């Protein structure tokens, strides 16, 4: 503990700062992600809770549950930077035995190591996972092939009953802003669904036809009504997967600084070099305040926004904020 700094760390617990510019894999392998999660739990505890009140969630949830019954296969899209924090706690319950494909979108925003770790984790669980890039379209052809092959049994069963074949129905579900509409547009090779760099753009459930064999249902991002896991909520805020009105930008940016400082692929030095702010042994909040004084006439909101925006643009390199539990 650095004397006099208690209480200035966002969230309460002293961070174990890592003065680290070593980016080799050995250091990354030794990094304790569970410890980072534990820190995050303490850091977020005393903060103003992240809380969303989008009026359309309850309605969408009900509609989606009804529509899920019609789906032959469900494509669940998550943010590759935070695959655990971007799944709805009730998703397993809703899906039951329905066939599921997991898509980790924004693959361009994580490192190869992150990707490999998640690929191995999900494959060990027997879950089919596809990495995709909704902006450039990577992964989409594989996705449509897999959806069709998983749902092929539908028409075999229909034929046995003397019914005509029908297109396979695939529903695309996931949190706001994870890239659902972009993926559909890429699959269709045209702009059928509005996609935008802010959460909550898709407002209604919408079926779209893909060739003669596949029908896709785009849905508005679904979030749990209440979020009990504040560490997950902060990660959603950092990754811009929830609306800005749900959180305090300065708190969230300060937590991000504390996380980046710990991550082996970023570390304190990278932050210092980028912002020319001396942060030796200090907290995320102090860092943001200093940056505000240096660049933004003391406006901490602007400083906080700059750090968040730099992270989202990959200025610290492409880093995931979660790794699979061991
Ligand atoms: N870098 C990157 N950006 C992506 C990717 N996929 C989507 N985006 C961007 O992320 C933003 C959100 O994408 P959308 O497709 O609107 O997300 P959505 O899940 O449909 O969002 P809602 O309508 O809020 O539910 C857009 O600015 C996309 O261009 C990706 O793989 N990589």
Image: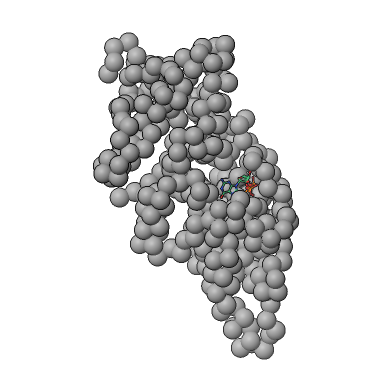
Q: Is residue 47 left or right of residue 305?
A: left
Along the line of sight, the residue nearer the viewer: 90 or 101: 101
Looking at the picture, does residue 159 appear above or below residue 81? below
Looking at the picture, does residue 57 appear above or below residue 299? below
Along the line of sight, the residue nearer the viewer: 205 or 211: 211
Residue 14, image x, y percentages: 32, 23
Looking at the picture, does residue 74 appear above or below residue 302? below
- The image quarter containing residue 169 is bottom right
- The image quarter containing residue 266 is top left
Whether residue 104 is visible here, answered yes or no, is yes
Residue 270, image x, y percentages: 39, 28
Residue 1, image x, y percentages: 27, 18
Whether residue 66 is visible here, answered yes or no, is no
Name the residue rendered at 36%, 30% in the picture. 267
Along the line of sight, the residue nearer the viewer: 80 or 13: 80
Q: Is residue 265 left or right of residue 100?
A: left
Residue 297, image x, y percentages: 57, 11
Q: Is residue 251 left or right of residue 204?
A: left
Name the residue rendered at 59%, 70% in the picture. 72
Name the residue rendered at 49%, 34% in the picture. 315
Q: How many marks?
A: 0
- The image quarter containing residue 223 is top right
Looking at the picture, does residue 38 appear above or below residue 107? above
In this picture the colour scheme is: one colour
Name the residue rendered at 46%, 22% in the picture. 275
């Amino acid at each position: 503990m650095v004397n006099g700094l208690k209480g200035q760390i966002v969230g309460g617990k002293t961070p174990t700062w890592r003065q680290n510019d070593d980016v080799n894999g050995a250091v990354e392998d030794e990094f304790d992600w569970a410890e980072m999660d534990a820190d995050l739990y303490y850091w977020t505890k005393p903060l103003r809770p992240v809380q969303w009140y989008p009026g359309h969630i309850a309605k969408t949830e009900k509609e989606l549950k009804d529509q899920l019954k019609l789906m032959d296969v469900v494509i669940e899209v998550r943010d590759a930077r935070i695959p655990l924090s971007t799944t709805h706690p009730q998703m397993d319950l809703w899906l039951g035995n329905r066939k599921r494909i997991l898509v980790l979108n924004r693959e361009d925003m994580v490192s190869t190591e992150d990707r490999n770790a998640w690929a191995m984790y999900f494959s060990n669980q027997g879950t089919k996972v596809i990495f995709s890039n909704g902006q450039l379209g990577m992964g989409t052809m594989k996705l449509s092939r897999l959806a069709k092959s998983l749902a092929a049994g539908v028409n075999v069963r229909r034929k046995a009953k003397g019914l005509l074949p029908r297109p396979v129905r695939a529903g695309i579900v996931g949190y706001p802003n994870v890239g659902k509409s972009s993926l559909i547009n890429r699959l269709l090779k045209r702009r059928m669904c509005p996609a935008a760099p802010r959460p909550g753009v898709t407002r209604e459930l919408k079926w779209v036809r893909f060739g003669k064999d596949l029908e896709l249902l785009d849905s508005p991002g679904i979030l749990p009504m209440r979020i009990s896991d504040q560490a997950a909520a902060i990660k959603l805020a950092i990754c811009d997967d929830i609306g800005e009105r749900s959180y305090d930008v300065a708190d969230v940016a300060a937590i991000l600084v504390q996380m980046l400082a710990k991550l082996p692929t970023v570390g304190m030095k990278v932050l210092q070099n980028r912002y020319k702010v001396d942060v030796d042994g200090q907290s995320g909040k102090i860092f943001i305040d200093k940056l505000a004084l240096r660049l933004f006439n003391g406006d901490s909101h602007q400083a906080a926004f700059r750090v968040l925006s730099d992270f989202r643009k990959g200025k610290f390199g492409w880093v995931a904020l979660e790794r699979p539990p061991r």
